[in-house]
């Protein structure tokens, strides 16, 4: 039995969250405010990476209970990177931690220990972030407006160019690369 959530369902959930929290469907989603509204905090931690998705001994998402979680970010990263990582962590929190009702003793996320054997939960968080920060209809309009220019689209959404590439690929839209 698989626990995978389809990209379509994830996109629906992201759109529902945008409506519930009045985030709009434009390019200016305030992810930090969403984290706070959901009861979370944001922590920028210094230190060496420990594992692929951990910062300074802390993990990207630590959940202590319902409405009590921390998104940890690395220092010296771009606002685009931080926005995307916060949105992905919110996605993992909403799609998995709350849904599964995990308690504090099992709530520190580690990719290798995630409750899905092949990292589906990690990937689903990224799908959520793409849908939340770059809603399909808005993405298609911005893509058309900028003629598929990856850098311009990334700038419009304040996300890393690589995430624009992934979103365009998922929507089967061509991109120009400079």
Image (spheres, grey):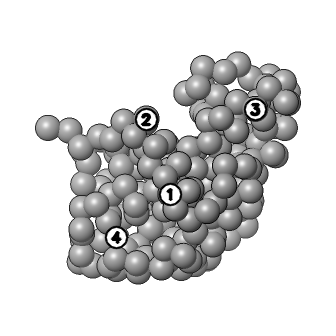
Numbered tag placed on residue 8 in the rendering: 2
Whole-angstrom CA distance, mark 4 to mark 2, is: 27 Å
Residue 48 seen in render = no
The picture quadrant where one finds residue 110 is bottom left
Query: Left or right: where does residue 126 sit relative to residue 31?
Result: left
- Badge 4 marks a residue whose secondary structure is loop
Q: Mark 1 points at which residue?
A: 17
Numbered tag placed on residue 141 in the rendering: 3
- Badge 2 marks a residue whose secondary structure is helix
Query: Mark 2 near mark 1, Cβ–Cβ under 8 Å?
Result: no
Q: Mark 4 points at which residue?
A: 108
Question: Could you tell which of marks 3 and 2 lies nearer the N-terminus?
Answer: 2
Residue drawn at point x = 65 percent, y = 35 percent: 137
Quadrant where the image shows the C terminus: top right
Query: Mark 3 near mark 2, Cβ–Cβ under 8 Å?
Result: no
- Badge 1 marks a residue whose secondary structure is helix
């Amino acid at each position: 039995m698989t626990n995978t959530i389809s990209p379509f369902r994830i996109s629906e959930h992201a759109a529902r969250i945008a409506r519930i929290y009045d985030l709009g469907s434009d390019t200016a989603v305030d992810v930090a405010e969403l984290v706070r509204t959901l009861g979370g905090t944001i922590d920028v931690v210094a230190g060496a990476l420990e594992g692929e998705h951990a910062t300074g001994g802390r993990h990207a998402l630590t959940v202590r209970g319902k409405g009590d979680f921390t998104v940890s970010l690395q220092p010296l990263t771009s606002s685009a990177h931080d926005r995307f990582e916060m949105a992905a962590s919110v996605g993992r929190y909403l799609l998995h931690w709350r849904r599964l009702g995990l308690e504090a003793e099992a709530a520190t996320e580690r990719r290798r220990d995630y409750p899905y054997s092949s990292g589906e939960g990690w990937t689903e968080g990224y799908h959520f972030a793409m849908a939340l920060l770059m809603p399909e209809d808005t993405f298609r309009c911005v893509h058309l407006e900028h003629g598929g220019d990856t850098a311009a689209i990334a700038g419009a959404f304040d996300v890393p160019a690589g995430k624009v590439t992934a979103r365009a690929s998922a929507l089967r839209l061509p991109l120009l690369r400079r």
